[in-house]
Amino acid sequence: MKFVDITKRAGRSLRESKARTILTSLAIGVGAFTITLSLAAGAGGRQYAADIVSANTNKQELQVSQKQESALSGPQEYSDSPSVTFGGRFSVKQLSSADIDKIAAVSGVKSVSPAYNLSVKYITRVGAKKYNASVSQYNNAMSYNFIAGNGKNLADDEIVLSKDYITALGFKSPQEAIGQTVDLVVARAADIVPPQDQKTFSYKIAGVIDQNELSFASNQTVILVTPAAAKTMYDYNQTGTTTYGNYLAAVVIAKDGVDVNTVKDQLNKLGYDAQTAQDLMSTIFQFINVLQGILIGFGALAVLTSVFGIINTQYISVLERTQQIGLMKALGMRRRDVGRLFKLEAAWIGFLGGAIGAGLAMVVGLAANPWISNVLSLPKGTDLLIFQPLSVTVVIVGLILVSVGAGILPARKAAKLDPIEALRTE
Amino acid sequence: MIEIKHISKTYGKKESAFEALKDVTFTIPDGASVAILGKSGSGKSTLMHAMSGLDRPQTGEVVIDGQNILTLKDKQVDRFRAEKIGFIFQSFFVQGNETVSDNVSLPLEIANVAFSSRRKRVEAALDSVDLLEKKNNRAKDLSGGQKQRLAIARAIVNNPSIIFADEPTGNLDSVTGAKVEDLLFSYNKNKGATLIIVTHDADLGAKCDIIIHIKDGKIESIDNKKTRDGAKR
């Protein structure tokens, strides 16, 4: 018997018992719904994470620090290398200036900028109040949300401020602030006894940024200067302290066209701990994948339940159609084809359930996306549920296969029916 | 030609064993109409099942056109039935929820007949039983006589060389029964197909060329109108 004919007959006998077919399909549909939504949430989550990471990092960038001891129980052996010790047990090894030079010498490294750990007393300008300030280094790789000016070719005597500082420092508009001067006042940390020596560093405002929804630095008080400017202030701030010249971490930029992973391997060989943007992303992805796995597990449970439903329905169907099966076998239909007929009916149920569940999931998901983005205050245009045609197809095909699997036992029963016995049934 | 050689069939085992057929032997020439006549429990249905390959007697041979079907594999027996045999049952066994044409199309599908020739053959078969105008109706909406005519269309659609009819008129009144009989005999005459009717109705049996009387699993007598030899066994 031709496969097409069996498929048609299978579809026809399902149409005969519509209510039963739909109810059985709905059970598997619940599983399809859950799994489709989980996959969509996973895809959306990964996309969102990738957006965040690419907005905050450069793929040529590595975060480098000293390899840290992992075992941190009991007293730790003293090391002469620079470190910050917390309570005698936990100590973080730092990078010395020698380490920075060593890293810079690695082939493929374009630049190394240590994370200057400087503290600024306050920011102000003529005629304005003093405000607390925390200075960071401008990073070309990050996507800042400039509302005035820009950070391109930021000079060492220029500064980028967030919008709120502009208002606080008395500018009427961000545009007006461009080119104006602000003062950062830095004290010498080595002068423990007051009065501390302090010095004013003046910068021209080159750009004003607003909060970037994808940025980690989402607080509204951002002050950015070039690494060189940061070093100048750091030198004044930290010279004479015990930690001067030692850094918790450094940012390494690999040369263009050099695979960031080969640089990472070399740095690891030298005994440093180097992490690429991808490493960071894979950590986030792992977290998302675990969550997605849990959700899919619930879906799988629903599918498992529906498997018993399909087995039950198909067994009843075989009983009801004993006579029909007997006739088909008497007319010369092969066992294999009778089995196929029932497996295909199960496949239809799986397809229907998969299509209903996945379809409903897409409708609900697409309708809910704007609402979810709103509640979680995600940036505009970010969808947390992304339906990929491939994964939806895989879900439906997978459920068809599961259903066929569930249909095997009833199909075998049908195939084994003795036509003489079956036709005796009146 | 159908040659039945010394077939025996026993159901059950040991004390509960029941011998439904005891060393049955006879021959049916091609194109004959045959009645297997006997009371219920005489073994006539078992004989029909054995001849059509639905059942396998423990001993003996069922040779059809030179081929002993008892030595065939299940797959080959299925194919033999699909290609050479048509069945008609007392309770019709038409699929009520399917259309009339879908019912008739089933044997063609089973026998792997190409799509292109199916429709024509289905319509020809329905036409010969006067049901063509009902082809898109559901089979359950037909009357008893129409259902049996539908069953005949289903039995002849694949041009079988042998038709088995198990009490074909048993559930019908005499008028509709007569029409069904006419259809069967005319197919037998016109197409030269062997017609084997299993019945307890002596009047129906009398219309056949050969009458095989069966009782308690044994052949009592075979009347052959054509040779008039009335061989006694």
Image: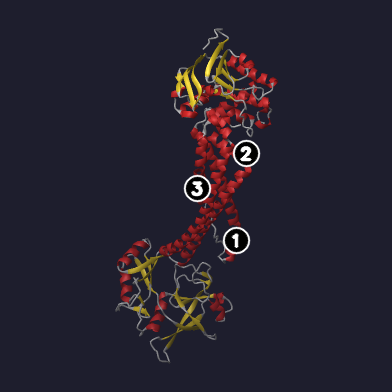
Measured in 3D between alpha carbons, the distance from the residue under mark 1 to the one under mark 2, in whole angstroms, is 41 Å
According to the picture, the residue beneath numbered tag 1 turns out to be: A370
- The label shown at residue A398 is 3
Disc 1 with disc 3 on a shared chain: yes
Q: Mark 2 packing: few (<14 Cα in 10 Å), some, or many (20+)? A: few
Whether residues under marks 1 and 3 lie with C-beta atoms below 8 angstroms apart, the answer is no
Q: Nearer the viewer, residue A236 or A83?
A: A83
Q: Chain of mark 1?
A: A
The percent position of residue A109, horizontal first and vertical second, equals: 34, 67
Task: Tell me the amino acid under the disc marked 1.
Answer: Pro
Q: Residue at x 33, y 63 (%)?
A: A265
Q: Chain of mark 3?
A: A
The percent position of residue A275, horizontal first and vertical second, equals: 38, 66
Task: Tell me the amino acid under the disc marked 3.
Answer: Gly
Measured in 3D between alpha carbons, the distance from the residue under mark 2 to the one under mark 3, in whole angstroms, is 25 Å
Task: Tell me the amino acid under the disc marked 2.
Answer: Glu
Q: Residue at x 55, y 65 (%)?
A: A379
Could you say whether the residue bearing mark 3 is in a helix, strand or loop?
helix
Residue B134 location, quadrant: top right
The percent position of residue B181, horizontal first and vertical second, equals: 64, 18
According to the picture, the residue beneath numbered tag 2 turns out to be: A16
- Against A411, residue A205 (above or below) is below
Which label's residue is closer to the chain start, 1 or 2? 2
Disc 2 with disc 3 on a shared chain: yes
Which label's residue is closer to the chain start, 1 or 3? 1
Residue sticking out furthest to the top: B228
In the image, which is nearer the foreground, mark 1 or mark 3?
A: 3
